[in-house]
């Protein structure tokens, strides 16, 4: 396992919603460039940049038509070069999103595959004479008929996103060339979208084969020296043993596992059917993954991302105090913290009117369901509301943003919180500094300490450094803890004592 990933703080940017520079209502590369000083001030080491490749935009850039070009809505190749250069000058790396499971139906590979089955691109996609029972994650059959080729093609998601055929060796080599190109441009890492799906076998109705995933990753990385890169896989199907195997083989450094973020879903009924949030399950799941990856593995630490709406809205009724508690907990755990844009100021799901939803997954679901509460909590648009730089949307763009929402929380802006050293934003900045000051918080072992259900208490230990204790009140009630605090390193409240106030969290030395 690479050691350089242990000191990284990664900031996830959804480009369309981060900062608009040309007042068309859509975030862009030059907008990101204009905020690099903010990211440097915050202390992040790496930007995970959502897809900015050329795309028709059926799935907001996750339907790529050209892996080498920049979509005009985000800027130009020259703008991307400038972003990489300006970020490097601030000692910030850029991690690109790679979609290796599927392309856009407008990609030249797919058009060639559709027109000429016996040509060089004929088998780049999954074609069959008859569909089977597999369904798309976006609803309906996973097969769509092509009147041109007179066969059905497979798509895990929308019909506009045909799946690549990972049984075709040359296709994998061409995607490896894509990684090589971007590394030469100065990219410092990759996040592989739904990478576990490249291991499916559609003929046996199997969504996952670990050996196929491993072989695919080897192919993807075959054209680059990945030793200095940060490699992250979105792969909810992997178990802990498989994650460790990929990490030890340097095929992935971290994996996004979604067990924690799915705790408010009814098991086996999909993302939209909500279940009461269980503090017990939350605690147990966190501990389980910390312990399973303790020896030889490494965790990714996140609450939200572009597909996961705000946890504080879903679990904690928009509580800013709970947001602070989650921040301290996240930075106290063993693994690499991912901050999703707006986490640091406590952004919420806010309110999107029914007619303003944009996401293809949500729109497909609403065709067959009136479960508006499920959409309000889990719809991906709620994770994509433009960044709250100032009150209203003028800090993001002087035009109407591409995605409209009604602000339901005041004071949760960068402008307000940069003026208040007691704010959530300054807490994040302090936590980032703390991780870089105390190596035990980066590389130390996780040692669970038994307490009652309402508390999560653990130590981070390392033979070369004094152990650090993390005390977290998971509830909105006062809770006593059995530890004697000697020195506070970071806390959500002033003057912690033997009684933790609602959602109070402390990183400290104890006697």
Image (cartoon, rainbow, N blue to C red):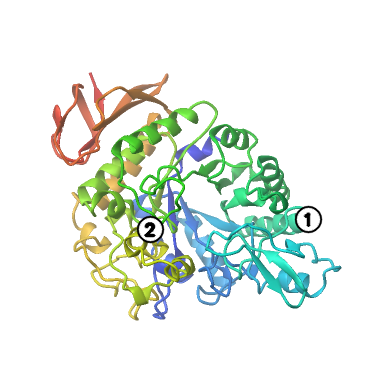
* Badge 1 density bin: few <14, some 14–19, many ≥20, Cα 10 Å: some
Relative to 118, 75 lies left or right: left
Q: CA distance from mark 1 to mark 2?
A: 36 Å
Q: Nearer the viewer, mark 1 or mark 2?
A: 2
- Report which quarter residue 490 is drawn in: top left
Residue 180: x and y, percent?
Answer: 68, 55
Relative to 219, 159 lies left or right: left
Residue under the point 69% across and 60% down: 164
The label on residue 378 is 2
Residue 230: x and y, percent?
Answer: 56, 46
Q: Nearer the viewer, residue 37 or 247?
A: 247
- Report which quarter residue 115 is drawn in: bottom right
Whichever of callouts 1 and 2 sits on the residue coming sooner in the sequence is 1
Relative to 26, 232 lies left or right: right
Q: Which residue is mark 1?
A: 168
Q: Nearer the viewer, residue 493 or 434?
A: 493
Q: Nearer the viewer, residue 154 or 56?
A: 154
Q: Is residue 476 placed above or below 408 in the rendered structure? A: above
What secondary structure is marked by label 1?
A: loop
Residue 324: x and y, percent?
Answer: 25, 46
Work out which quarter of the rendered image holds the N terminus and state it.
top right
Residue under the point 40% across and 35% down: 285
Residue under the point 73% across and 62% down: 125
């Amino acid at each position: 396992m690479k050691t350089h990933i242990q000191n990284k703080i990664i900031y996830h940017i959804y480009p369309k919603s981060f900062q608009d520079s040309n007042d068309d209502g859509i975030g862009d590369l030059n907008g990101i460039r204009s905020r690099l000083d903010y990211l440097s001030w915050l202390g992040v080491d790496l930007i995970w940049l959502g897809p900015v490749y050329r795309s028709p935009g059926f799935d907001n850039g996750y339907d790529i038509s050209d892996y080498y070009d920049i979509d005009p809505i985000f800027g130009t190749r020259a703008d991307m070069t400038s972003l990489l250069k300006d970020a490097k000058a601030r000692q910030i790396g850029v991690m690109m999103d790679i979609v290796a499971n599927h392309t856009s139906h407008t990609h030249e590979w797919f058009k060639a595959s559709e027109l000429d089955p016996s040509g060089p691109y004929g088998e780049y996609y999954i074609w069959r004479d008859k569909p089977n029972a597999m369904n798309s994650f976006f609803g309906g059959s996973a097969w769509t008929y092509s009147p041109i080729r007179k066969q059905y093609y497979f798509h895990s998601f929308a019909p506009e996103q045909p799946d690549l055929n990972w049984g075709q060796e040359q296709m994998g080599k061409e995607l490896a060339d894509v990684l090589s190109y971007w590394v030469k441009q100065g990219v410092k890492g990759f996040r592989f979208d739904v990478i576990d799906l490249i291991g499916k076998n559609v003929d046996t109705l199997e969504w996952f084969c670990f050996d196929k995933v491993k072989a695919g990753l080897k192919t993807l990385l075959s054209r680059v020296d990945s030793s200095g890169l940060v490699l992250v896989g979105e792969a909810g199907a992997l178990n802990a043993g498989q994650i460790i195997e990929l990490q030890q083989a340097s095929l992935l450094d971290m994996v996004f596992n979604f067990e924690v973020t799915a705790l408010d879903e009814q098991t086996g009924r999909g993302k939209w059917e909500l279940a009461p949030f269980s503090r017990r399950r939350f605690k147990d799941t966190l501990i389980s993954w910390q312990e399973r990856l303790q020896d030889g593995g490494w965790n990714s630490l996140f609450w939200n991302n572009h597909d996961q709406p705000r946890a504080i809205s879903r679990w904690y009724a928009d509580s800013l105090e709970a947001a602070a508690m989650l921040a301290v907990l996240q930075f106290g755990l063993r693994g690499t913290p991912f901050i999703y844009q707006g986490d640091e100021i406590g952004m919420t799901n806010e309110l999107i009117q029914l007619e303003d939803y944009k996401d293809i997954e949500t729109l497909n679901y609403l065709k067959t369901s009136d479960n508006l509460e499920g959409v309000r909590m889990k719809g991906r648009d709620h994770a994509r509301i433009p960044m709250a730089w100032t009150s209203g949307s003028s800090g993001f763009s002087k035009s109407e943003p591409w995605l409209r929402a009604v602000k339901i929380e005041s004071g949760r802006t960068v402008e307000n919180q940069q003026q208040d050293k007691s704010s959530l934003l300054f807490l994040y900045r302090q936590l980032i500094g703390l991780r870089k000051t105390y190596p035990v918080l980066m590389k130390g072992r996780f040692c669970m300490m038994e307490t009652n259900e309402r508390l999560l208490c653990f130590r981070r230990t390392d033979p070369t450094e004094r152990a650090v204790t993390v005390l977290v009140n998971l509830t909105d009630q006062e809770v006593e803890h059995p530890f004697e605090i000697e020195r506070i390193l970071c806390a959500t409240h002033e003057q912690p004592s033997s009684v933790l106030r609602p959602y109070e969290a402390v990183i400290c030395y104890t006697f």
